[in-house]
Image (cartoon, rainbow, N blue to C red):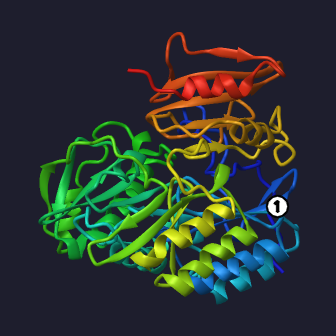
Amino acid sequence: MLAAMPAPTPSPGESPAEPPAPGTGRDRGDACPGALRLHSADDGFLARVRLPGGILTGRQADELSALAEEMGDGHLDLTSRGNVQLRGLAATCGGGLGGRLRAAGLLPSDRHERVRNVVASPLSGLDGNGRADTRTWARALDALLCADPAVTALSGRFLFGLDDGRGDIIALAPDVTLIATAGGAVLRCGDDPDGLRVDGADAPRAALLAALHFLDAVRRLGTGSWRVRELPPGSRAGLAGRLAAAGIPAVPVPFPPGTAPEPPAPGPVPGPDGRTALSVGAPLGRLTVAQWRLLARTAAEHGDGELRVTPWRGVVVPGLAAAHAEARLAELAAAGLVTDAASPWHRAGACAGRPGCAKSLADVRADAGAALAGARPSRTETLPVYWSGCERRCGRPGGGRWVDVLATDDGYRVAVRDEGREMPGSVRPVAPGGGLPATVAAARTVTT
């Protein structure tokens, strides 16, 4: 039986910000958890199951709920990369967990399971706004990754992004991005201002070659980098030649300008084919087994049998008849899921906190829940908010403007951050019992 491998406590989202490459402070190996390499936390062991493109079949969803109930703590955590985590696992569960994940098709390659980090536009093919259905790319890229032994050298933090042209995935700053265009796709590495135009049919293979190109640069330079943005300027050159040698014509082009995209709002998502998808949020990124099973049952009985987990800790249920959408949405709302963009729970998240994480200074989930439960719905714009139990801020938003609620020895510290930097004059210390819900609500309010 495969035993769990202890490692530093992870978050309910993804791992905390990466330390720099060797020579600038990185002093340990990549400890990203997986489905086979479990991580130790104060509430048991944790497994992270990668879902390329966030796509799940009904059978796979059912198996995950069964595993959470039988082996875990009865919950499923959604991460900022559209993956699912199981917590509260026993140290001896590794062999049984791996066997059941393989049987459900959730573990196609043991060696590659931690590098299958692929996020994709969750509304692709559903609302008529994208230029391609990225599910095709996600499946093809996943198959290519699992077939290539060289990519096992990638860090568990390396991220592939598949954007259907609406700009939502670009905002997540993947290491390798494919964005659909009218004439195919543009491939981008890290934050390069320019990209390479390739044919849509070649896009998944071009993304794989970009990852291999990154690994070659890491070996050549000896940097030990985990992410493309850690490479020195100029070290990413030569990719066009590599693609050409592989029979993939690539034309340098400016990368499409960025936008300020929003994640899928909770509620119905009408489609051009007369079908409707349902977009819902998981309160603080966590679902009970009962909530997860209701989503799977909704997909099986009223949709097309598929679930899509989003990088914004939500779930999309595609393929419902428009006439049934409102009733099913009301059922999901009654089960405690976030179904309305006016809800204070929309775009609110929290790390694991106590008792699951030894580093946390507070039970941030309980405090966040108490603050949100007493907040009123708002029809005006509000900022995302994230509660963190310590300075690591595991799972925090990757960019944009958001409210940072940080536990301290003396209560909480509330501030507004913009692209990672605190906005001047926004810091508000809050002592225990000092009105945290009102302070957070005021910080979330957008003024013009």
Asked if 281 appears above or below 261 in the picture, the reply is below
In which quadrant will I find the C terminus?
Answer: top left
Q: Quadrant of residue 182?
A: bottom left
**Residue type at numbered disc 1:** Phe
Q: Position of residue 308 (x, y in %)?
A: 50, 70
Residue 12, given in percent of the width and then of the height, sits at 69, 52
For label 1, the residue is 45
Q: Quadrant of residue 206?
A: bottom left
Point 39% across, 57% down: residue: 216
Q: Is residue 408 above or below residue 400?
A: above
Residue 350 as seen in the image, left or right of residue 205: right
Tell me which residue sits at (54%, 33%) in the image.
23
182 horizontally vs 397: left or right: left
Question: Image point 54% across, 60% down: which residue?
Answer: 280
| Residue depicted at 31% across the width and 36% down the height | 233
Q: Judge by depth and name the residue closer to the eye, 49 or 167.
A: 167
Crowding at mark 1 (Cα within 10 Å: few <14, some 14-19, many 20+): many
Indicate whether 240 appears above or below 424.
below
The answer to whether residue 378 is left or right of residue 162 is right
Residue 214: x %, y % from top left: 38, 54
- Answer with the quarter of the image where residue 347 lies: top right
